[in-house]
Amino acid sequence: MSFRKHILYVDDSRDTSVPANIALQPCCYNVVRASLPTEALRLAENSYFDLYLINPSLCQGVALELCKKIRALDAYTPIVFCASVANESFRKAATQAGARGYIVAPVEPWEIEETLLHFMREAESRKQDLIRASRCITEPRPKAVSRSAAA
């Protein structure tokens, strides 16, 4: 059984994908790379991932549209953008599209790992809360024993 976290990394540029792969592979992550949004969406539909990491340098609007489509498929798994520049308007648009985080590179490898772990732990906690809540709703309540029947 593998306990490695599975991350879908979407980036159409080989140059910018290298730092994330270097930062994540030694940290026991299985990073699957997609260079096209259509490929990323197909992988998201057919595989399980613990986190989606998207480089917003994809063609204008494509990264946001991909984020929306992934969020429609999966309401809980974190989507994080990793950009080379801080763009507050894009960050707001990414959040509205369903992203949970936004990393501005360059960052140290340990910072990437720490940030992604934070989002994955937060998502796992939410999933566990939902499981507990659904058990409360679906499990039948114990029948009350009437005092006359118990006597």
Image (spheres, rainbow, N blue to C red):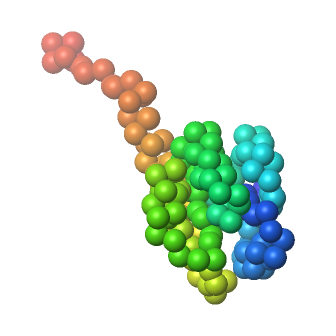
Where is residue 32 drawn, in percent x and y?
Answer: 80, 60
Q: Is residue 88 left or right of residue 3?
A: left
Name which quarter of the figure residue 13 lies in. Answer: bottom right
Q: Residue furthest front?
A: 60
Where is residue 47 drawn, in percent x and y?
Answer: 76, 45
Q: Residue furthest left?
A: 148
Q: How many marks?
A: 0
Where is residue 57 drawn, in percent x and y?
Answer: 68, 65
Foreground residue among 126 and 149 = 126
Q: Name the residue at 81% across, 76% down.
A: 15
Q: Name the residue at 64% across, 84% down.
A: 106
Name which quarter of the figure residue 113 lies in. Answer: bottom right
Q: Residue furthest top?
A: 149
Q: Name the residue at 62% across, 70% down.
A: 82
Q: Is residue 86 left or right of residue 69?
A: left
User: Can residue 17 be spotted in the picture?
Assistant: yes
Q: Residue furthest bottom?
A: 108
Q: Is residue 59 above or below residue 17?
A: above
Where is residue 19 drawn, in percent x and y?
Answer: 75, 79
Foreground residue among 10 and 130 = 10
User: Can residue 121 be spotted in the picture?
Assistant: no
Q: Is residue 137 above or below residue 2?
A: above
Which image quadrant: the N terminus?
Answer: bottom right
Q: Name the residue at 71% across, 60% down.
A: 58
Q: Is residue 103 above or below residue 134?
A: below
Which image quadrant: the C terminus?
Answer: top left
